[in-house]
Image (cartoon, helix red, strand yellow):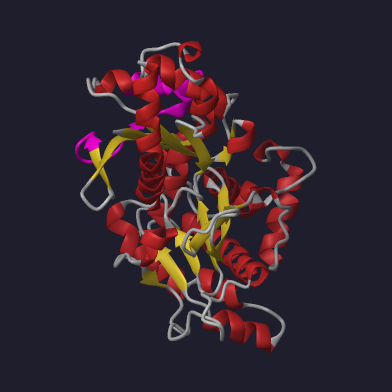
Amino acid sequence: MVIAGNIGSGGSYLGIYKKDDNGNPVLVFPSDEPKQYDSASYSSPEDMIKAFLQDANINEPIYAACFGISGQPENGYIIGLDWKFSQDELCDFWVEHSWKKKIGECDEAKIKELPVVRLVHNIEAIDFNVLLESGELVELNDEANTANDKDKGGVPFNCALIGVRGGLGEALVYWGRPPGTFDQETFKTSPSEGGYANLAPSSEEGVKLLNYLFEHPEYLKGPEVVTCQDVLSERGIVSMYQFFKDKQGEDGATAPDELEKLISDKNIKSAAKEIIKMALEEKNALCEQVIDLFFSIYGAEAGDLALKYYAKGGVYFLHGSTTPPELVDKLIDKLKQGSFMQAFTRRTMPQVVDLLKSIPVKFVQDANTRMIRGAARRAIENEPLASVFYRECK
């Protein structure tokens, strides 16, 4: 068995998996869906994983683990948390708390070279090859050319992944094989830190928002710079709400009391959810303005990504957990008919407009679960060797 998880500042999800007869991951604990933890309540990932192991109370050996993180795996950094850790340190922890041995009693070099605990960028954890076979993908671009997904040489076109949660995640998906191997060619994911790129609004309202954020640096992660994920994130949604609220003044749309309470309590995740919920339910004009601008900037960024990666194979919109399940259909309609797709194709050159109109834009439901299952697959790949090291260590 293995442990897999998706770890971020807004919440973490952990589960224990085993492989079925076809080698696919099957959730063992919890039995229904991965267990959620409030990341900020723990001082380190080790403390959170230790709590999970205690909750699971599994007596069988767990050989390996893989965690997708919202940050930089190589630097042990997660956006929005003060944790500092490394893959090697997690391997030490794993041997002690899961294998019940000290790392010095085992073959440390082999354990860390495998490694028995692997960190990947959370968007990289998604198994894109499995995603393509999903029947849950929804096309957002009615003009997309879906008849041809390969170039003249038969090589599949590049694709792109984009998603917003605590921050902005972006990745290139390309056709190839792992470097230095003769494995079969397949889709590979190359993550980025595009969320930290400087924001370049392409609309008059977007420029006003940019100037507002410069005047209110309390809404920014760093002084004097507005990044894409200062806007395309849960906290960005809340910042936009404040922007429209201040812009309208006392004579503007009424601010809902329950939303104001969430914001004053700095419950950003819940506040962002409430803004989206009230907008999709058409219960508050202020919230509707927020998501119109939010999806306009989001759509423009998705279109930029398609151009930069020449992603003729499609852009995949990773839906997170900010929209209540019962409102997902309304969200899809909003994306298709509203500012998102309009901004996706809004360019100056007709040839570029035509190119973007031809690119599929797929809505990916339940992206969080897909990230965890992708991490589980990676852990299962390491399980056979990890089990050998475990027995040698014992």
Which image quadrant is residue 306 in? bottom right
**Image location (x, y in percent) of residue 205:** 67, 63
Any part of residue 40 in sight: yes
Is 40 magenta? The answer is: yes
Q: How many marks?
A: 0
Residue segment shown in magenta = 28-52
Q: Nearer the viewer, residue 138 or 380?
A: 380
Q: Nearer the viewer, residue 380 or 8?
A: 380
Q: Nearer the viewer, residue 314 or 1?
A: 1
**Image location (x, y in percent) of residue 357:** 55, 82
Any part of residue 364 in sight: no
Is 205 magenta? The answer is: no
Which image quadrant is residue 293 in? bottom right
Residue 97 against residue 324 in the figure, above or below: above
Residue 100 against residue 333 in the figure, above or below: above
Q: Is 51 left, or right, of 104 in this rendering?
A: left
Q: Is 227 left, or right, of 245 in this rendering?
A: right
Residue 110 against residue 362 in the figure, above or below: above
Residue at the extreme right: 224
Q: Quadrant of the C terminus?
A: top left
**Image location (x, y in percent) of residue 130:** 36, 60
Residue drawn at x 49%, y 33% is 115
**Image location (x, y in percent) of residue 80:** 58, 33
Q: Quadrant of the N terminus?
A: top left
